[in-house]
Image (tube, grey):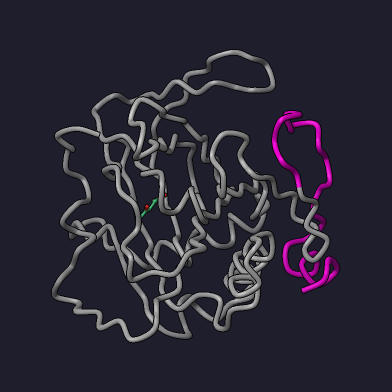
């Protein structure tokens, strides 16, 4: 997809690099004009701070909300196959952006896989909800893309071989991360589960800590199943680990 196509879908995409620190590995993804960089401390974690501009977030919100029935406690939805999202302009753009994130990865296989994604998980979080530390299941290929919507939350990455090495990554609405290689296999990721209604976030631009209210959040995670995976829906692996307090990290 070329820049003009993405701009047709998302409107003008800013090239402003003022929010960027020097030690991040930057790629100005020429295919998409998305400003994508590799996290300076977590190899294979590719970040895009403005993956979905605010106007598109507003258009997507009602479409994403249809995944959930909060009154019935249904806060997670899975989709498999070719039609992961509603067939709208905005959802098509979201999938195109996710595919463009794969273009940053060094593996040509991942860059060109087709379909790029055939599995989706939509998660809805209340302020005290989160997800315990985990790596995604081996049944999924490398190259996992997570979009964040509605509010800012911290995703904590912990290096499995050195559990004291913990890195907090700020996920703002409209941002997107792609987990590959080390980030996918050698680090766990988690969102804090606690009754605290605020989170402390370090702002790398001002070098100051800021308190953010924890609010409702929606995430969309896109993955590709490995071949020949028999997925037993009754197994419901994800629901087992959601919203429970982990013993230890
Ligand atoms: O909601 C998120 O941002 C992360 C979701 C996730 O890690 C998962 O569903 O496995």
Q: How many labels, in total?
A: 0
Name the foreground residue: 178 vs 52.
178
Let me know if residue 24 is in the magenta part.
yes
Within the image, what quadrant is residue 131 found in?
top left
Furthest residue in direction front, as rendered: 161
Q: Position of residue 134 (x, y in %)?
A: 30, 48
Taking the spot 41% from the left edge, 74% from the top edge, the residue there is 119
Name the foreground residue: 241 vs 51.
241
Q: Quadrant of the N terminus?
A: bottom right
Taking the spot 58% from the left edge, 55% from the top edge, the residue there is 58
Q: Position of residue 80 (x, y in %)?
A: 37, 80
Furthest residue in direction top, as rendered: 208
178 sits to left or right of 243: right
Looking at the image, residue 74 lies above or below residue 152: below
74 sits to left or right of 223: left
Within the image, what quadrant is residue 121 found in?
bottom left
Q: Position of residue 75 (x, y in %)?
A: 27, 57
Let me know if residue 11 is in the magenta part.
yes
Within the image, what quadrant is residue 26 found in?
top right
Name the foreground residue: 127 vs 142.
142
Point out the stretch of residues depicted in magenta.
1-26
Looking at the image, residue 180 lies above or below residue 130: below
Majority secondary structure in the magenta region: loop
């Amino acid at each position: 997809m070329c820049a003009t196509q993405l701009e047709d879908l998302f409107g003008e995409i800013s090239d402003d690099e003022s929010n960027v620190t020097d030690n991040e590995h930057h790629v100005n993804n020429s295919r998409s004009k998305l400003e994508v960089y590799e996290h300076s401390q977590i190899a294979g974690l590719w970040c895009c701070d403005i993956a979905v501009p605010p106007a598109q977030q507003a258009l997507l919100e009602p479409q994403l909300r249809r995944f959930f029935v909060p009154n019935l406690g249904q806060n997670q939805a899975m989709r498999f196959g070719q039609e992961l999202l509603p067939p709208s302009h905005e959802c098509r753009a979201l999938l195109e952006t996710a595919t463009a994130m794969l273009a940053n990865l060094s593996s040509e296989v991942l860059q060109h896989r087709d379909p790029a994604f055939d599995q989706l998980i939509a998660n809805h979080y209340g302020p005290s909800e989160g997800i315990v530390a985990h790596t995604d299941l081996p049944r999924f290929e490398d190259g996992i893309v997570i979009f964040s919507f509605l509010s800012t939350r911290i995703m904590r990455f912990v290096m499995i071989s050195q559990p004291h090495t913990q890195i907090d990554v700020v996920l703002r609405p409209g941002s997107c991360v792609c987990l590959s290689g080390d980030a996918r296999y050698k680090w766990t990721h988690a969102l804090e589960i606690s009754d605290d209604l605020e989170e402390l976030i370090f702002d790398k631009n001002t070098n100051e800590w800021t308190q953010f209210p924890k609010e409702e959040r929606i995430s969309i995670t896109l993955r590709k199943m490995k071949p020949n995976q028999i997925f037993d829906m009754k197994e419901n692996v994800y629901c087992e680990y959601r919203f429970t307090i982990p013993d230890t990290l």
